[in-house]
Amino acid sequence: MTSTVIEFITYKFKSNIDQSQIDQMNNELNAFLLEQPGFYYRSLSEDANGLQHDIIYWHDMQQAKQASEAFMQLPVCKLIMDSTVADTVNMQYMQVLSEVSTLMNEPA
């Protein structure tokens, strides 16, 4: 087992939110994440039903939780929360049991 943690969030955007608004929110969120200690990687995908799957990898649980607390203070957090359908939001943290990546073989 590693210390790596996955933050896994699913949600749907409200129907009045357009792609340019989503792109702007993602740009702001990505900029925030890049400044956070312990941040490894983020990916966002959308399934056939319009459900967003936001997956963020962190060095450990402490850094994941600290970033989450800091995020709650940002204007973009309120914007994202106001843009999502509340009963579709599900957030969980999971300890990574095993991991491998081609990036682990890249020279530093």
Image: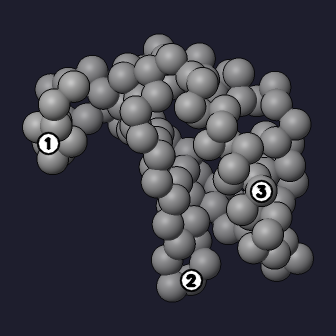
Residues at circles 1 and 3 in contact by the CB criterion of under 8 Å: no
Provide residue 67's location: percent of width, then percent of height.
Answer: 60, 23
Res 52 quadrant in image: bottom right
Q: Nearer the viewer, residue 13 or 103?
A: 103
Q: Report the residue marked by disc 3.
A: 24
**Direction from residue 56 to residue 102 in the image, left or right:** left
Q: Report the residue marked by disc 2.
A: 49
Q: Is residue 58 visible?
A: yes
Q: Is residue 85 visible?
A: no
Res 33 quadrant in image: top right
- Give the Cα distance between marks 2 and 1: 30 Å
Which quadrant is home to the C terminus?
A: top left
Lower sequence index among marks 2 and 1: 2
- Give the Cα distance between marks 2 and 3: 22 Å
The residue tagged with tag 1: helix, strand or loop? loop
Which quadrant is home to the N terminus?
A: top left
Which amino acid is tagged 3?
A: Gln
Write the residue at 56% across / 31% down. Answer: 34
**Direction from residue 71 to residue 2 in the image, left or right:** left
Which amino acid is tagged 2?
A: Asn
Write the residue at 52% across / 54% down. Answer: 54
Which amino acid is tagged 1?
A: Val
As drawn, 28 above or below 65: below
Write the residue at 79% across / 69% down. Answer: 20
Q: Report the residue marked by disc 1.
A: 100
Q: Nearer the viewer, residue 66 or 39?
A: 39
As drawn, 34 above or below 9: above
As drawn, 91 above or below 48: above
Residue ranking furthest to the front: 107
Disc 2 residue crowd, few under 14, some 14–19, many 20+, Cα 10 Å: few
- Give the Cα distance between marks 1 and 3: 31 Å
Provide residue 42's location: percent of width, then percent of height.
Answer: 47, 46
